[in-house]
Image (spheres, helix red, strand yellow):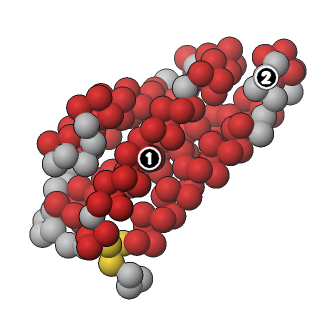
């Protein structure tokens, strides 16, 4: 692959998607586990939004690697390593993204092992991890605005 510019549209869309999904999760009754669990739709909504937010973060990382650096990766955990090696993410942020990638894989392939209680805990305790990676991307992108292409 040959390095090229990043699509401002793709970047904005993925970051916006993460924000929307986090907002949807935060709109659920997370201050009361009983209320959260009382309506099974909350669990489905939380699972769907969490998985979509994780995939958007990973897709954006893959876009940065593919377009910005000409590097193709096939596995989600490789995205974190590639971003760390190219100083897009710090070592700590890359490790966090690896953990998030592992959880996304677990949600997709071992969904039957993730119960409502675990999902509630993740949504009440760990959403800031997604925000942290999104913010790391924003900071890197702001420092590299010349890498962004305005055309569709």
Depth order, front residue of 108/51: 51
Q: Which of the 4 image quadrants contains residue 115?
A: top right
Q: Residue 111's x, y, as percent?
A: 55, 26
Element at badge 1?
helix
Contact between marks 2 and 1 (CB within 8 A): the answer is no
Q: Position of residue 47 (x, y in %)?
A: 63, 34
| Mark before the other along the chain sequence, 2 or 1 | 2
Asked if residue 63 is positioned above or below residue 57 in the image, the reply reads below
Q: Which residue is at 37% across, 45% downward?
A: 136
Farthest residue to the bottom: give it: 151
State the residue in front, 60 or 106. Answer: 60
* Residue toward you, 85 or 52: 85
Q: Is residue 21 above or below residue 43?
A: below
Q: Residues within 10 Å of mark 1 (few under 14, many from 20)?
A: few
- Above-or-below relation of 14 to 150: above
On the image, the x and y values in percent for residue 60 come to 38, 55
Q: What residue is disc 2 on?
A: 31
Q: What's the residue at 47%, 50% (across, down)?
A: 56
Which of the pair 60/31 is nearer the observer? Answer: 31
Q: Residue at the location (65% across, 24% down)? A: 124
Figure quadrant of residue 126: top right
Give the numbered dot on residue 34: none
Which quadrant does the C terminus fall into?
bottom left
Please identify the quadrant where the N terminus is shown. Answer: bottom left
Q: Is residue 84 left or right of residue 112?
A: left
Residue hosting label 1: 135
Counting every numbered tag in the picture gives 2
Q: Is residue 40 visible?
A: no
Q: Secondary structure at mark 2?
A: loop
Residue 11 place in picture, x, y as percent? 42, 63
């Amino acid at each position: 692959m040959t390095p090229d510019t990043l699509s401002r549209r793709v970047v904005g869309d993925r970051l916006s998607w993460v924000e929307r999904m986090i907002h949807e999760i935060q709109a659920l009754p997370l201050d009361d586990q009983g209320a959260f669990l009382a309506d099974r739709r909350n669990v489905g909504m939380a699972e769907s939004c969490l998985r979509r937010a994780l995939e958007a973060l990973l897709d954006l990382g893959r876009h940065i690697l593919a377009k910005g650096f000409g590097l193709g990766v096939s596995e989600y955990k490789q995205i974190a390593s590639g971003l760390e090696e190219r100083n897009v993410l710090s070592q700590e942020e890359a490790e966090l993204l690896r953990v998030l990638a592992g959880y996304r894989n677990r949600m997709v392939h071992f969904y039957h092992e993730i119960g409502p209680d675990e999902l509630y805990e993740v949504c009440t305790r760990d959403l800031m991890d997604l925000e942290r990676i999104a913010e790391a991307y924003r900071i890197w992108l702001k420092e590299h605005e010349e890498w962004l292409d305005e055309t569709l």
